[in-house]
Every structure is written in C-alpha cells, then in structure tokens.
Image (cartoon, rainbow, N blue to C red):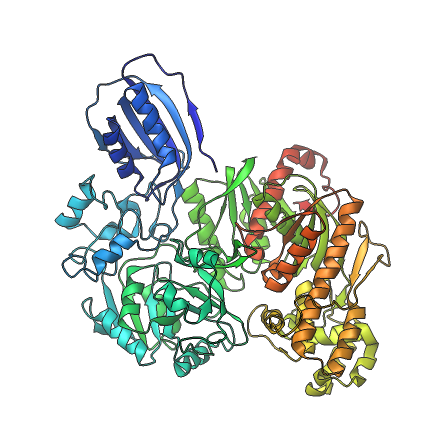
C-alpha cells in the first residue's frame, strides 16, 4: 500500500520544526534507531518515541533537510518495516540540539501495526557461530532485524515491559547495546545474552531435568540421531521432531500421534539440503529462504540424493519443507540430523501447546524427551503453509510470519468482525482501510480450540483497539463461530449471516480490489446453502453485497451426512446409485467386490428412504467419490485425504498432458430453481468412467480425465453465465483450488477464452480466508443498515440475513 502524506503549510524560515506521525509496521523493526541514524545524516535535531498509533518524531532543521529526511523515511525504511503513512504537522521551533529516543507514549487510540515473528538474521547467525562472541551458541540471539514479535507481545506500544521479556532484566553489556544508537541492538526489545536472558534445558518425558543450557541442545541432537522423538519449544508453539531419514522413528511418531497418513512437515538445515530430495523453482527457493519462513509445498525428486523416509509424506508427490527460523533450530540441526520431521506439538484436534507444563501433560506419551526454555509464548502461531502456483505464492495456511499484518482495502469500512468458518478457522477485524486476519486457529470442534478462538479475538481487539460495530458469521447455525456471534454480542449490535460461498467469492474480490459484478467459481467441500442443502460446486454472479446462484453441480445424496465425509465409499455408492440405481450392486467393479455387501445394501436403503441423506453439490465430495471408486481411499484419517490422493495419482507424467474429459452435460434445472440457469451433470461421465474401470484402464489416466472433466464442465458453465450477464471477470475460490491440477487447468482454460481471471494470493482460497469475505460483505451492506433495521427486510435474494 502506498504511503499517505499529509502536512500543513510550510512556514517560510531558515529553520523549521515538524511533528511526524508515522503509521504502519514501525514498532519492533528498528524504526526509531533508523530515524536516529537518519537524523544524524541529514543534520536534524529532535526526538522520537513509540505511540499507540505508530511512531512520532518531532524534528527541526532546514526546509531542504527536513524534506530529504521525510523522503528517506518512505524510500529506504528498515528491512522489516512498512510505512503506510506520514502525517506532517508544522510546530514551533524550540532550538532543540541533538536527537534522542524518548520513552513511549500511550494514548486513547491504538493504530500501530505489529510485526510478525521474523527468522533470525545472518548477522546474528554469524555471531552465534563465532567462538569469540559473547553470544556464541546462544539459542535466543536476536537484534532489531530479527526474532520474536507477535508471539511475545502482550500489549502495545511494543516495549520490553509489554512483552514476554519483561522478566529478564538486561545485564550491563546488553543494556549498553540497547542504549547505544550505533548498535544493531539499539532498542531491540528481546535483546538478551547467556548472562541475563532465557535459557534452554532438556528433560525426559516426565519433566525431570537431564541437561542444562551448556549441553541441552547437543544432547538433544544426539537423541534425535538415535531415533528418539523430541518435543521442541519453538517460537509460536511446540513441535514434535524426529530424524526424517529414519523409517522406524517416523513410524513410531505416527503410531504415537495417531496420525497414520497425513504428511509431516520437514525442517532442513539449508536450501541445498532441500534440493537433495525436492525440486525447486527460483520462485519456490525465494519463498523458502525469505524471512517469513513458511512451510513450502515442493515436488519430491523422483531419484532423491538423500534417504528421506517414504513414511514422511506417503501417497503424496509433494513434501512440505521449511528452513530453520530460530537460533535454537539452527543449533539443533547442527547437533543432529540435517533434516527433521517438525510436526505440530498438540493433542489431536487441539491448538498448539505453548506452555511447558501443558506440553508435558499433552504429549509426554508421544515424546521421549523435551527441549524446553523459560521464555513465555504469549500467543501461539502455527507455521504458515504456501505453494507456488502459476508463478504466484498462494497460502494454504496463513499464520506465523504473516499474521497479524493487514490486508489493504480499497475503501474505508466500519469496525466489523468476521467470525470465520467452522473448519480451518481464522477471524477478521476491519479498521478503516485495513482488514486484520488472525493467525490460524483451527477446527472449532473442541473446548480448547474454542477457547483459543475467544482469546484470539480478545487479543486482537486489545492490540488493534477495535470494538466491533457489526458482526458477520456463516449461515450454518451449528458452527461454533455462528453460535459465538449470536451469544457473545449485545442485541443492539447488528449481526449478518453470510452464505459460505458468497463469503469465499468476496474474499477473492477484496484481495484483488474488485467492487463490481463478477462470475465466481467456488469449489469446496461443505457450505450450507440458502435452500438448506450442502453446497460446494457453485457458479455465482456476485457483488460484495449480494449474489445469485447461476449454476451448480448436480445434487447427489450424501448417505449418513458427516459420516460420508469420513468414509468416501459412501459417496462412491451415492454416485453409482445416481448413475445406475440399485442395479449398481451388480456391476463387476473392484469397489463392489471389496466392500461388505451389507454395508452397501444399508446405504442403498438410506438413499431410497431418504433417511439421514442430505443432498450435496459439493465438488470435494465428488472427488472423494471418485477416489473411492478407483480404490485409492475408502476411509480418511485427515481432511481432504481422498481428494488429495486422487490428485497425486493424476500427477503422473505417463499420459498426455491434456486428456479428453469424460461426458459432462449442462442442462436446465428441473424443477426450476430461483436464479439457477445450469446444472453441471457429471453422471454421464461417471458411467463412462465405470466402463474404463471395468476395462482396467490405469487409474492414473482415469484420474486425469476426471480432473479435466471438472475443469471442462465448470469452464463451459462459467463462460455461458458470463456471456449471459455481460460479466468479463471470473474469480476462483474455495479449498478445491489448492488442487494443482484443477487450479492450473481452470485458470488456463478461462484465460484462453478471453476472460480476466482473479485468484487468491494474500489469503487462503480455503476456509482460512472466509472471514475476510464475511467482513467485507457486512461492510458493504452497512451503508444500507438503517434501511434494513427500519424496514426489517431481507437483502437481495440469498446473500445474507440480518439478525
């Protein structure tokens, strides 16, 4: 976002004075030391302090010097800083001499931006590796250019007493660095050393000490090399680590963690270590080595140069890798294996553990040893996950390293809370022209995650000084986030129920600065529709205020409701039942032969009697069904497993890059549904697919043809809708677009037809970005709020409802 400049009229004088109010990411990033050095360079006198809205500087000098000083602030800020605005007010000259940093000022308004946590910088790494340096091998080395930020901040302004470092009084040497404007640690709030700072220690699984600061990391590395499971307290929470080349250790971790299939994330010592087992483009290498340090999804090498365990990411062509981002990580990798599994340290389904005792209580039955330290983590933050698609970095999960930086908005909005979805939850708060998306919270399915949700909201409200004026939530009444919106806020605060797929579409519109009608292709697993059915394969004509559903996948029965999500064979049975009726039981299919006929008969009875069999247009469930039909996955142990493994099978290069799609009919709805113009019917293609299965066509080829069928069907329908409604912009949203085959083919197909295609790059395409769309819908509708409240009417068609 370009910086905004405002100033009063400059007085005509040889020496003038100005007050500069600087907003953006300007605390915890060395901004005041930067101004100190800049003032000396331009012969400026005055003072600078942190405030609740950012940084305030009172400066005096010649008009030319002050002009160059202000220009340099935005042209060459510190590496981690982001200057969003500089407001200049001319004030009386006081004859100040020198330039000083003064104590922070509090105020009634809090508008400063907080920096995310940042990986350790090269200067600190060099010092940590120098035997002559007083921080040699110190695992908490940091400076103004690196280290913890968001996860240790309790409140703003960002000063040491407001952070987890308040319990560590600086020694004279550290204090001297902190006070020295010429030092790299000048006003570095987490500044510490082995004499005065946090310490690391090693315990067994019962919490009994084994090693202190001098040998803890070295012994931990040796334990990892021996195949032990190590719990590691990191920056935003705990990891569970094992040697990534040790099959037995990885399998032991899977058994103890009850995680039989889901891919594990890896941490490698360097980019060269990663290149031994994964292919990387220049863009992927750049993301991997950037200071945000996300997990990057990379393609496995067909002939790896190192013995990475095949159990790390079974049945998956990709592996998620990150580089070390704390000094402790570097030291641990130097002391032990150079590539580690680093998976989340938590109870199943619960948030990351951040407290030593909680971690011991939560997974002492999993970890053999615990590498702990005594610096508190105030706020947990999971590792972010990204992948590079079509040359752009796209989030699967946006969290550590990125949150809580805002998404810029094209116009000002009231204070709105977007409560998010039920799965992969994040929440969103808006303020003026900024939308603050929280770190990853998770699936709101247990008490601890729901508590974390409430804590996150309260923390964001505090550090951002936002009290919501409008609350937006999902249409589904069963989501915890929906119940929270209805129970937590006073009746006088308007609440807006936003349909799930409309929120998806608008989240993509917002990050691409679109405020006009678009055609939205929204593909995901689950979202309650306005007709009471489960949607997930949708084409909408949408604005930020409203939408009309114009096309969707043919409804399929979903026998057992949520049970069909966990057991894809139920969806496969539903697809076959829709295509052939009960006669599908007589088909000569491995799928039929491998399943208990009593189970299949029971599911058929459910569909015939329409008992616990909701209807769904979900693209995710259709992918599950095909995965099951092909014998890939009948039961899942993690979200989207069946569809991900179907994609993996289809990524083989053994067949033509553009396989012919199966039959897919576009037909008018019967009975006619309000607004709907096209039904995308893949059942004729399912019949062709069954023929291929019976003919023993390789599953790789069938997977490729199926994916091409989805792309072909939705592209055709979207182009028809776009032409009929004279819309030339198409947005792609929903978790299915994390699928590389679908994303790349859909994006390319639509662009070839001359439409402008807009995709996600700032927030996840899945449910992790939906809170942004909810907030934006409510913000757009807020202009009409008095009329809604006065007349007690519903907005256009099915976009939202007001409580």
> Is residue 103 left or right of 709 when viewed as pictured?
left
Q: Is residue 220 above or below residue 287?
A: below
> Is residue 570 left or right of 149 when viewed as pictured?
right
Q: Residue at x 23, y 46 (%)?
A: 185
Q: Position of residue 700 (x, y in %)?
A: 65, 75
Q: Residue at x 45, y 44 (%)?
A: 461
Q: Position of residue 420 (x, y in %)?
A: 56, 53
Q: Residue at x 80, y 59 (%)?
A: 679
Q: Is residue 62 above or below residue 171?
A: above
Front in this rendered view, residue 649 or 479: 649
Q: Residue at x 77, y 86 (%)?
A: 588
Count of residue discs: 0
Q: Position of residue 441 (x, y in %)?
A: 48, 58
Residue located farthest toward the top when viewing the structure as drawn: 12
Front in this rendered view, residue 251 or 564: 251
| Residue 375 in sight from this viewpoint | yes
Front in this rendered view, residue 713 or 484: 713
Q: Is residue 522 above or below residue 651?
A: above
The quadrant in which the C terminus is found is: top right
Q: Position of residue 372 (x, y in %)?
A: 29, 66
> Is residue 568 left or right of 83 when viewed as pictured?
right
| Residue 551 in sight from this viewpoint | no
Using the rendered view, name the quadrant where residue 134 is placed: bottom left
């Amino acid at each position: 976002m370009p910086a905004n400049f405002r100033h009063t009229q400059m007085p005509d004088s040889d020496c003038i004075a100005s007050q500069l109010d600087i907003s953006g990411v300007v605390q915890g990033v060395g901004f005041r030391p930067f101004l100190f050095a800049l003032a000396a360079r331009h012969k400026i006198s005055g003072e600078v302090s942190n405030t609740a809205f950012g940084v305030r500087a009172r400066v005096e000098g010649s008009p030319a010097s002050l002009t160059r000083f202000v220009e340099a602030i935005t042209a060459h800020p510190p590496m981690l800083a982001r200057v969003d605005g500089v407001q200049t007010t001319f004030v009386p000259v006081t004859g100040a001499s020198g330039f000083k940093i003064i104590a922070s000022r509090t105020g009634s308004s809090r508008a400063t931006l907080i920096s995310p946590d940042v990986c350790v910088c090269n200067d600190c790494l060099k010092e940590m590796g120098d035997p002559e340096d007083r921080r040699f091998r110190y695992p908490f080395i940091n400076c103004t250019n690196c280290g913890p930020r968001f996860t240790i901040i309790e409140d703003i302004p960002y000063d040491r007493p407001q952070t987890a470092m308040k319990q560590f009084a600086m020694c004279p040497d550290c204090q001297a660095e902190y006070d020295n404007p010429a030092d790299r640690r000048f006003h570095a709030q987490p500044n510490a050393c082995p004499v005065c700072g946090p310490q690391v220690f090693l315990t067994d699984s019962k919490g009994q000490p084994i090693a202190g600061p001098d040998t803890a990391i070295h012994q931990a590395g040796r334990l990892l090399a021996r195949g032990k499971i190590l719990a590691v307290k990191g920056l935003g929470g705990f990891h569970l680590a094992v040697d990534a080349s040790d099959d037995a250790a990885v399998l032991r971790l899977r058994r103890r963690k009850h995680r039989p299939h889901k891919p594990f994330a890896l941490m490698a010592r360097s980019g060269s270590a990663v290149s031994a087992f994964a292919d990387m483009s220049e863009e992927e290498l750049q993301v991997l080595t950037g200071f945000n340090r996300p997990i990057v999804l990379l393609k496995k090498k067909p002939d790896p140069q190192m013995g990475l365990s095949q159990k790390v990411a079974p049945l998956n062509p990709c592996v998620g890798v990150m580089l070390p981002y704390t000094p402790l990580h570097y030291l641990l990798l130097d002391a032990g294996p150079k590539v580690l599994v680093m998976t989340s340290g938590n109870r199943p389904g619960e948030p990351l553990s951040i407290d030593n005792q909680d971690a011991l209580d939560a997974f002492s039955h999993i970890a053999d040893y615990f590498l702990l330290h005594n610096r508190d983590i105030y706020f947990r933050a999971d590792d972010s996950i990204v992948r590079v698609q079509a040359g752009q970095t796209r989030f699967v999960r946006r969290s550590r390293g990125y949150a809580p930086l805002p998404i810029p908005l094209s116009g000002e909005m009231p204070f709105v809370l977007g409560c998010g979805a039920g799965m992969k939850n994040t929440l969103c708060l808006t303020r003026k022209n900024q939308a603050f998306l929280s770190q990853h919270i998770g699936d709101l399915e247990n008490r601890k995650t729901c508590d974390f949700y409430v804590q996150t909201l309260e923390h964001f409200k505090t550090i951002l000084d936002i009290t919501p004026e409008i609350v937006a939530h999902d249409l589904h009444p069963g989501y915890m986030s929906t119940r929270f919106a209805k129970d937590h806020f006073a009746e006088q605060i308007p609440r807006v129920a936003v349909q799930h797929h409309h929120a998806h579409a608008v989240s993509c519109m917002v990050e691409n600065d679109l405020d006009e009608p678009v055609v939205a292709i929204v593909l995901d697993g689950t979202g309650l529709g306005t007709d009471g059915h489960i949607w997930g394969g949708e084409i909408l004509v949408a604005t930020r205020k409203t939408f009309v559903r114009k096309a969707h996948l043919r409804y399929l029965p979903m026998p057992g409701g949520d049970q069909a999500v966990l057991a894809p064979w139920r969806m496969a049975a539903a697809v076959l039942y829709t295509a052939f009726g009960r006669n599908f039981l007589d088909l000569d299919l491995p799928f039929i032969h491998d399943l208990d006929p009593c189970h299949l008969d029971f599911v058929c009875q459910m569909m015939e009697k329409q008992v616990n069999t909701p209807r769904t247009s979900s693209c995710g469930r259709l992918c599950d069904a095909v995965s099951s039909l092909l014998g890939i996955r009948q039961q899942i142990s993690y979200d989207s497993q069946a569809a991900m493994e179907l994609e993996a099978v289809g990524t083989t290069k053994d067949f033509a890059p553009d396989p012919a799609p199966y039959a897919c009919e576009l037909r008018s709805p019967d009975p006619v549904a309000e607004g709907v113009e096209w039904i995308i019917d893949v059942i004729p293609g399912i019949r062709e697919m069954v023929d291929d299965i019976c003919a023993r066509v390789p599953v790789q080829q069938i997977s490729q043809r199926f994916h091409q069928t989805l792309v072909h069907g939705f592209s055709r329908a979207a182009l028809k809708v776009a032409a009929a409604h004279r819309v030339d912009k198409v947005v792609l949203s929903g978790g299915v677009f994390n699928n590389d085959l679908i994303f790349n083919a859909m994006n390319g197909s639509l662009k070839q037809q001359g439409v402008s295609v807009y995709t996600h790059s700032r927030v996840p395409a899945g449910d992790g970005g939906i809170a942004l769309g909810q907030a934006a819908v409510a913000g757009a509708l807020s202009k009409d709020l008095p009329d809604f409240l006065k007349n007690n009417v519903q907005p256009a068609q099915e976009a939202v409802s007001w409580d």
